[in-house]
Image (cartoon, rainbow, N blue to C red):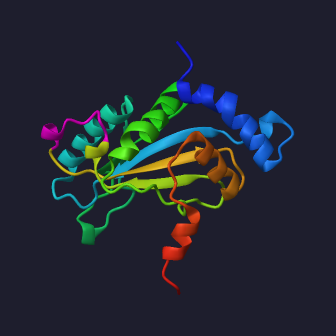
Amino acid sequence: MSTPALLKHYKEKVVPALKEKLGYTNPHEVPTLEKIVVTTCMGNAPDRKVAVDDAVIEIQKITGQKPSITYARKSVANFKLREGEPLGARVTLRGARMWDFLYRFINITAPNIRDFRGISSKSFDGRGNYAVGIPDQSIFPEIELDQIKRQIGFDLIFVTSADTDAAGRALLAELGLPFRDIKKETAQAPAA
């Protein structure tokens, strides 16, 4: 099996750039992408069981890997939810499949988002991991638009080995994740 193009780019271009930018002396200190988690929840769908089955099919088409079904941990009467009922689906991508998915997301999927001007750089968790929400599956080229039964939103979580948000942001930006300009983003934020 050949090396994914984005992994080759990471080893040849990103590692030296991050060593210089972040001041690392050892190449093993440079943060890397560990996994990508794709998750969805169908909690508000009236036909939750069928919706979860649809979500499993859609995620499998998008990622090329069969997702696991997540179940409710406890009953909530207000949401008509019983313990043990299927609630959503998620898949964890690692290795070559992860690098291929990220390459497709950066170069094909993200530009398909309507009025796309870049993704927000504010969704870091404090430890270098990044999450982005996708409102519907129609932006993915693997999905046939006439086969869509319902709109399904996803969360993509990029888990990195970085220990700070700055290092995680630098890694993802060097890999090509299209962040909005940070200066513009802070200027548009409403004053509190």
- Measuring from the top left, give residue 190's x and y in whole percent: 48, 81
Range of magenta residues = 140-148
Q: Residue at x 66, y 57 (%)?
A: 165
Q: Residue furthest bottom?
A: 192
Closer to the camera in the image, 173 or 159: 173
Q: Residue at x 48, y 37 (%)?
A: 102
Asked whether the viewer can see residue 43, the reply is: yes
**SS majority, magenta:** loop
Give above or below for 107 relative to 51.
above
Quarter assignment of residue 125? bottom right
Asked whether the viewer can see residue 69, the reply is: no
In the rendered view, does 20 fall on the left or right side of 74? right
Q: Residue at x 50, y 58 (%)?
A: 180
Q: Residue furthest right?
A: 25
- Measuring from the top left, give residue 64's x and y in whole percent: 37, 28
Magenta-span inclusion, residue 191? no
Magenta-span inclusion, residue 145? yes
Q: Residue at x 50, y 49 (%)?
A: 178
- Measuring from the top left, give residue 50's x and y in whole percent: 18, 45
Closer to the camera in the image, 59 or 53: 59
In the rendered view, does 183 fall on the left or right side of 27? left
In the rendered view, does 159 fall on the left or right side of 152? right
Give above or below for 28 relative to 153.
above
- Measuring from the top left, give residue 181's x and y in whole percent: 54, 60
